[in-house]
Image: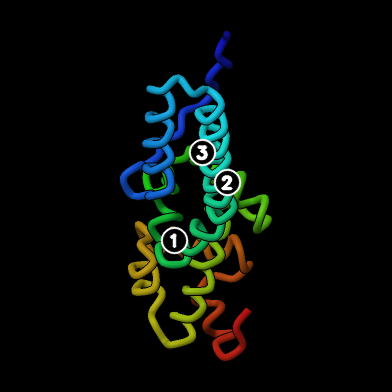
Amino acid sequence: FTSPEIDSVVDVNVQNDTFIFETLSFIRTYAQKSDCTHVRYLTDMLLSYIFEELIEAELSLPIKLKSHIDENFIKTFNENDLSSKFNYSNSYLSKIFKDKYNLTPKQYAKQLILKEAILLLNKGTSVYETAERLEFSSPENFSRFFKGYYGYSPSQYVKKFKNFPI
């Protein structure tokens, strides 16, 4: 008997999942009785269950990521470190997010910042205060960022389009 190569490790919390916990108990019982048929059957069933759970979690990951960015778009844009929150590499998170939404997390956060900037400017918030609220290091950096996307500086936008958002 040779065991297959292991190409990844999955951390499963056994105590929080009754099905897994009980199935492992049955496997131990049948293994002590040397009942290989039941051990194989239960092991197959357990692995199928775990893989289904993992696939479901992977499918919901882009949705959870989007929700996190919606709530933390300024931090996401400035730091772009989602790996510590989601326990996946930033490149993997970017890939799955882009596959679902056609944007990277950083591009999506940038759009949210620009929308928030428009809302603030339309409410009469100064360029300085808007830059501060959106955590830019300076109003000049905010103006360059804004102009790079819209083609107008924030103050030009306010003069031309105050009541007509881009």
Q: Nearer the viewer, mark 3 or mark 2?
A: 3
- Quick one: quadrant of the N terminus? top right
The tag earlier along the polypeptide, 1 or 2, is: 2
Residue 12 vertical position relative to residue 34 in the rendered view, above or below: below
Q: Are circles 3 and 1 on residues that touch, CB within 8 Å? A: no
Q: Nearer the viewer, mark 1 or mark 2?
A: 2
Q: Secondary structure at mark 3?
A: helix
Q: Position of residue 64 (x, y in %)?
A: 49, 59
Q: Residue at x 57, y 9 (%)?
A: 2
Name the residue beneath numbered marker 1. Answer: 68
| Residue 155 left/right relative to 129 | right
CA–CA distance in space, label 1 to label 2: 24 Å
Between residues 70 and 129, which one lies in front from this camera angle?
A: 70
| Residue 45 left/right relative to 135 | right
Q: Position of residue 33 (x, y in %)?
A: 41, 23
Name the residue beneath numbered marker 2. Answer: 52
Q: Nearer the viewer, mark 3 or mark 1?
A: 3
Q: Are circles 3 and 2 on residues that touch, CB within 8 Å? A: no
Q: Residue at x 35, y 62 (%)?
A: 135
Q: Secondary structure at mark 1?
A: helix
Name the residue beneath numbered marker 3. Answer: 46
Q: Residue at x 52, y 50 (%)?
A: 57
The tag earlier along the polypeptide, 3 or 1, is: 3
> In the rendered structure, which amino acid carries the disc numbered 1?
His
Q: Residue at x 58, y 40 (%)?
A: 48
